[in-house]
Amino acid sequence: FRGRKLQVQIIPFENRRQILVSHDATEGERVEAMRRDFIANASHELRTPLTVIVGFLEIALADPDLDAATRTAHLNLMTEQATRMQRLIEDMLTLSRLESDEYPLKREHVDVARMMESVAQEARALSGGRHQISVHVDGPDVMGSPEELRSAFANLASNAVRYSPNGGSIVLSWERGPDDLRFSVKDSGIGIDPQHLARLTERFYRVDKSRSRETQGTGLGLAIVKHVLARHGGRLKIESEPGKGSTFIASLPNTSLPG
Ligand code: ADP
């Protein structure tokens, strides 16, 4: 039990008293448990689309005379599932790179205004005109990883689109806060119940799995955002009201300003 905090409790059990000795998990044990969870979740997430693909392949092999329309429908479904696997693997690789000591942060000058325009353009393409998306840039350029920051901002913007009903409005802003720099995404979407807020950035944590899947989510987006911000010395703040909408604020320290 070296290095662990011991807890001794006397608890009544079937009219007898017994002593329960437990211990808090050490940091190593917690990391190991998280790793196990991650592998179990990732395997499950990959197995689901793979099962669909194998199913359709078996049908194709069993019935070589399948009519053309059914065959095309099956091929489309298989492509959809394979693409889903591709997205999952891309996101898992991104996360593992962000966590690895082998890829330390390389800071470069980031033209934030240009980045925001390109993120907004991508969000508009995803929305397909179903949302009103506007951009406000009132902050300076920063030093950071353009690829990482772009991926974090793009993740937040795409979530706003994916979790807002048609006709919703989304505002992307970049501005100076009282003592930080802030990229924020405000949506008028479905919102998030407060009980979920603390866990949203955990890998594979989703409020509604089926909605996340329908909208091509992997459950890893916010984990990636959190890691990118942590590498830049920043943090993510979430404000939300169920049924009204959410604001995700990615805050970067003033030390990100070009020297
Ligand atoms: P996903 O790929 O499922 O969107 P994320 O890690 O990006 O995964 O987000 C985790 C969960 O947080 C989502 O499944 C969703 O339930 C919730 N969420 C994220 N962004 C929003 C938002 N703008 N509005 C409402 N819920 C959101």
Image: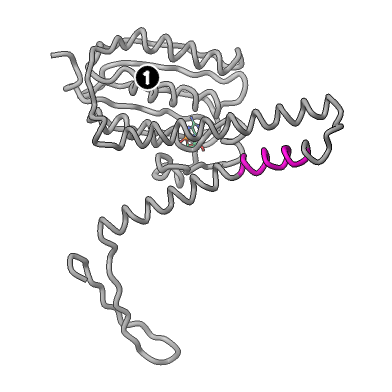
Tell me the element at label 1: helix
Magenta range is 48-59
Q: Disc 1 designates what residue?
A: 150
Q: Residue at x 86, y 28 (%)?
A: 67
Give the percent coordinates (x, y) of residue 218.
51, 35
Residue 56 to residue 106: above or below: below
User: 102 and 257: which one is in front?
Assistant: 102
Residue 173 to residue 58: above or below: above
Corner quadrant of residue 253: top left
Q: Residue at x 51, y 47 (%)?
A: 43
Residue sitting farthest toward the bottom? 16
* Residue 221 magenta: no
- Mark 1, residues whose alpha carbon is within 10 Å: few (<14), some, or many (≥20)? some
Decide if ligand 1 comes within 8 Å of the CB at mark 1: no
Residue 255 to residue 136: above or below: below
Relative side of 204 to 259, left or right:
right
Residue sitting farthest toward the left? 259
User: 144 and 11: which one is in front?
Assistant: 144
Relative side of 102 to 129, left or right:
left
Give the percent coordinates (x, y) of residue 224.
38, 33
User: 41 and 62: which one is in front?
Assistant: 62
Give the percent coordinates (x, y) of residue 56.
73, 38
Total numbered badges shown on the rendered structure: 1
Relative side of 116 to 138, left or right:
right
Q: Main secondary structure of the magenta part?
A: helix
Q: Quadrant of the C terminus?
A: top left
Amino acid at the residue labelled 1: Arg
Colour convention: one colour
Give the percent coordinates (x, y) of residue 150.
37, 19
Q: Quadrant of the N terminus?
A: bottom left
Relative side of 192 to 147, left or right:
right
